[in-house]
Image (cartoon, rainbow, N blue to C red):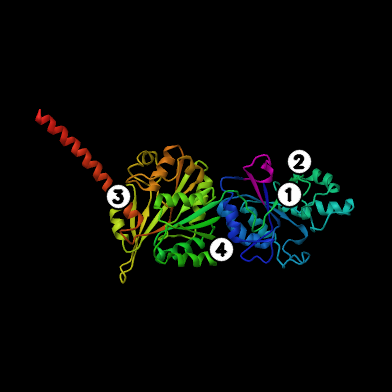
Amino acid sequence: MILTYHKISPFTPTHWWIDVDTFRAQLLALRGKKVVYLDEYNPQNPEHVVISFDGVYECVWRFAIPILREFGYCFELFVIGDVLGQVNYFDEPEPLARFANIDQLREMVDAGGRVQWHTSSHAPLAGRDDHELKRELLVPDHLLKLFPAPHFQWFAYPHGEYMEAADAIIRAHYRGAVTTNEISEEDPYQFGRLLVFKETKISKDRLSLIIPNYNYGVFIGEAISSVLAQSVLPDEILIIDDASTDDSRLIIDYYAEKFPNLLRAEYNSTNLGVVDNFRKAISLTEGDFVVFIGADNRVRYDFVEQHLAALKMFPDAAVAYCDIVLFGPRARIQASRLEPREEFSVKRIFADVATGAEQYLWRFPEPSPELIANMHEVNFVHGSAAYRRDAYEGVGGYQERKGVAEDKSLFHRMLASGWRAVHVPEPLLEYRQHSLDQANQVVGREASIHALQRENARLKTKISAIEKILGS
């Protein structure tokens, strides 16, 4: 796949412009693919991707290059020779935009770009004689000296239109050419390109974000707002309410009506409980990746972006989990319970003397073989980890198990079946500690009771055996 961009900017006056957030999201979708130069490109390899820019505008240098540097991707720059550093007066009715100059091209080359040729004037090639064709098709000597090989090895037809009359000249002077018509996967002089627009989906992988709610109307607005503020939005957002008796529906309806294209709501007529509610939510979504965010929690602006990147980077990973910030009136209590556990690191990072509010950074461990083997005792993957639907379905999804949290059971089964886990070492989840009735507190108490019951049964068996020995 050869991707072709034109203009990258915070503002998008026409469809030829892509905003920087969309551009970043599209590059993120390439994680797990192999981004290559045209020299290495094999159209038969579905993992190969080429990133290219036509015309090469100054806005590409200003806004796209920092993001490309961040991802470490290489790219191709198809320049129009006569307009370097000038304005696109010829391109009506497009808004005026300046092309990159030589110094900016040099900076883009330093960032991983290769300069290629897109004719001298970008005018149509039809009807030109051989002299005019050569002037359009061949790179002038002064540019060849400024950018010697491996630059100027590839040609891009103006307007993407392959022209047979130009073919012989191009074959004599270039390694290949790209077009949007007359495409061939076998002939490198007719490689096809995909014109990228804001709505273009680079990857078929989709992420479903689910917000389960039960009587958290006082908190859910914060949860929804943090999800809507993501640098990379989920492909679908489902809010599923498990028959709340507070004012949750009023809050949820407000957001669902205000953002109908971004999220939808589902209301259970009766309370299903955690496991059945989660299973229902999964059945109502279609994403290749899934993540649950508690209605009483919040996520950092790059929560989705970083979890998607981790799962795309490691195709054999079923689950990606991050670090946590504990906040709320019971944050200190929860932190004190975690401090003695050597697997985790807990540190106070904020304290307000006036209100008594505190926040704690909860660092999670890397998924070592020892931790995975002992996961039935120490759960190091929290419930807001992102995971693959394939892995979820492969192990039977969420299951009801006495004294065991639904997420612990799920992730334990995933890793036990051979999938790996990925730790994202950033505090992307803000986990509110506010009540003895919230899910993690209830499950924790149930687990403690279950453990005490098992120990009690063990001691009774031992006492019974001793009594038999003494009685004999």
Q: Nearer the viewer, residue 73 or 46?
A: 46
Between the C-alphas of marks 2 and 3, the distance is 65 Å
Q: Earlier in the sequence, mark 3 or mark 1?
A: 1
Does the magenta portion include 37? yes
Looking at numbered disc 2 in the image, what kind of residue is underneath it? Asp
Residue at the disc numbered 4? 260
Task: Please state which of the two labelled residues, at mark 1 or mark 4, is closer to the viewer.
Answer: 4
Identify the image quadrant of residue 437.
bottom left
Q: Earlier in the sequence, mark 2 or mark 3?
A: 2
Looking at numbered disc 3 in the image, what kind of residue is underneath it? Glu
The span picked out in magenta is 35-51
Task: Please state which of the two labelled residues, at mark 2 or mark 4, is closer to the viewer.
Answer: 4
Q: In x, y percent, where is residue 322?
A: 43, 52
Looking at numbered disc 1 in the image, what kind of residue is underneath it? Phe
Between the C-alphas of marks 3 and 1, the distance is 68 Å
Does residue 303 appear to the left or right of 5 in the view shown? left
Between the C-alphas of marks 3 and 4, the distance is 39 Å
Q: Secondary structure at mark 2?
A: loop
Contact between labelled residues 4 and 1, with CB atoms less than 8 Å apart: no
Determine the residue positioned at 53% across, 60% down.
263
Between the C-alphas of marks 1 and 4, the distance is 48 Å
Q: In x, y percent, where is residue 265?
A: 50, 60
- Neighbor class of circle 1 (other Cα within 10 Å; few <14, some 14-19, many 20+) is many
Q: Earlier in the sequence, mark 2 or mark 4?
A: 2
Between the C-alphas of marks 2 and 4, the distance is 46 Å
Residue at the disc numbered 2? 187
Identify the image quadrant of residue 248.
bottom left
Q: Earlier in the sequence, mark 1 or mark 4?
A: 1
Residue at the disc numbered 1? 152
Contact between labelled residues 1 and 2, with CB atoms less than 8 Å apart: no
